[in-house]
Amino acid sequence: MTSQPATGHTGAQLGGLVQQMVPQQEARAAVETTAVLPYARSRASSRTRWVRAWMMTLPIDVAALTTPLLLSQTYWRGMLAYATLAVAVLWSGGHYRARRHVSILDEMPSLGGRLLTSAAVVAIIAAQRHSSVEYVSGFMRDVALSAGLVIVGRTVSRTLIVFVRKHRWVEHNAIIIGSGPNGLELARLLRRYPRYGLRFVGCVDAPSRQETGALPLSGSLDDLEHLVRLLECEVLVIADPDCAESVLMETVLRPRSSRCDLWAVPGLWGSRSQGGYPDHIGAIPIIKIGDITFSGPRWAIKRASDLVFATVALVVLSPVLLLCAIATFLDGGRGVFFQQERVGRHGKPFKVIKFRSMRPLNEQESQTRWSIADDERVTTIGRFMRRTSLDELPQLWNILRGDMSVVGPRPERPHFVEQFSARYPNYAARHRVPVGLTGLAQVSGLRGDTPISDRARFDNYYIENWSLWLDIKVMLRTVAEVLRGGGR
């Protein structure tokens, strides 16, 4: 009986192995051949980088809400009240936030509900003020007309937004953070479907993904700041980076990176976007991370409130400023004001102005000495002004100039900023926003010789949870601290 070759009895097994290997090789080849590389920017989009969707949507909404006033001025007060309330409710509901997938059908449930709520509130007030059924019914006809026009206007604006995106007349440069499967699929979708308004310009990830990532890397996470500037990036999309969350957040909170809009692929099932209805790129869910710095309308509101406060405070407190200047002059002669270099927003230096409370021996001491609270050279007048924070009133001029804000992180000298940034990972993130005359850390007892890490945490908490009411709360607590003499 003749024996078969050693490989004869394994022929079926080899066939099975080959069948298993072929799909794997094809999949590997597909990844290699369909790798997405950055592509050229359209000529039109280079001139429209500043354009945002809400710039089209908001004016159309306002026009739709006020159109009934062109037909009749009988209900002009009620219609203006309705228009104002409707815009505020839509804004708070996220209807003017950036979206990647734009569709009027997605918006309809939330849009209709908020318009109905606004109409109900104004109708109740109108019914209380006017007992005439005819008046209220006429007013509600105008409200219904304006609400219908808003929906029509939204349909038009959404169609226009998709149209200009598809023709790449408006697109924003995007860097994907993460070179895994999600990152690769996002890059493919952005290349294939310009309707999302993003242009893929590169990908970064941890060095461990340099050879194993599915998407070619433009650099590592450490290169992100440089790439944002080089590629004129406006959007960062967090997909599936191979790094710890703390490392990732430290990277995106750096000054230049923090200016970009931040989007993320949620890592948990059931994660939903802000605004009441989900957003997505293709079939990949995506959410917009709330502003991690002050930009757009938030920055406009904060800057306007700073200007109003500083102007009013300079006028009201001018007698106090004059008395402080006279007392400082009598106490130490010429040189009433003391200027010192501090680090402001995005790490830019500026000269802070204060009333002089002592004379440092030299410029080196002024820049590198941490605390002078117990220094014998601090005069009686100077010590009083420091305890009551009157020495900081000239910084109102810094606020008017735009160097500072009323509320924000404490401005620090370059020598200490360099030291603290190297020692504390989250310290540099404070400079995403303008420094402040007062701040949450200061009114929480973190002044003088207190832990820098605690100050940084309070400052970053303030930035990430900012609201106009939070500013008001900090200012009220500052007044209480001054009256209590809780200064240095």
Image: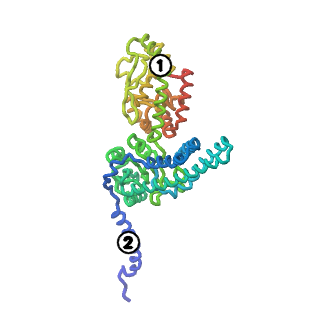
Please state which amino acid type lies under the numbered disc 2: Val
The x and y percentages for residue 23 are 39, 70
Q: For this rendering, which residue is in front, 158 or 80?
A: 80
Question: Which of the labelled discs sits on residue 53, or is there none?
Answer: none
Left or right of 347: which side holds 118? right
Q: Which of pointers 1 and 2 lies earlier in the amino acid sequence? A: 2
416 horizontally vs 150: left or right: left
| Element at label 1 | helix
Label 1 vs label 2, nearer the camera:
1
How many numbered markers are drawn?
A: 2
Q: Which residue is mark 1?
A: 318
Question: In the current view of this chain or complex, which residue is farthest to the bottom?
Answer: 1
Q: Residue at x 44, y 15 (%)?
A: 325
Residue sitting nearer the eye, 168 or 396 = 168
Please tell me whether residue 446 is drawn above or below residue 23 in the rendered image.
above
Of residues 233 and 64, the one drawn nearer to the viewer in this rendering: 64
Which type of secondary structure does the marked residue at label 2 adopt?
helix
Quadrant including the N terminus: bottom left
Q: Amino acid at mark 1?
A: Ser
What residue is disc 2 on?
22
Tell me the CA gap for discs 1 and 2.
83 Å
Mark 1 residue crowding within 10 angstroms, few (<14) / some (14–19) / many (20+) = few
**Colouring of the image:** rainbow
In which quadrant of the rendered view does residue 251 lie?
A: top left
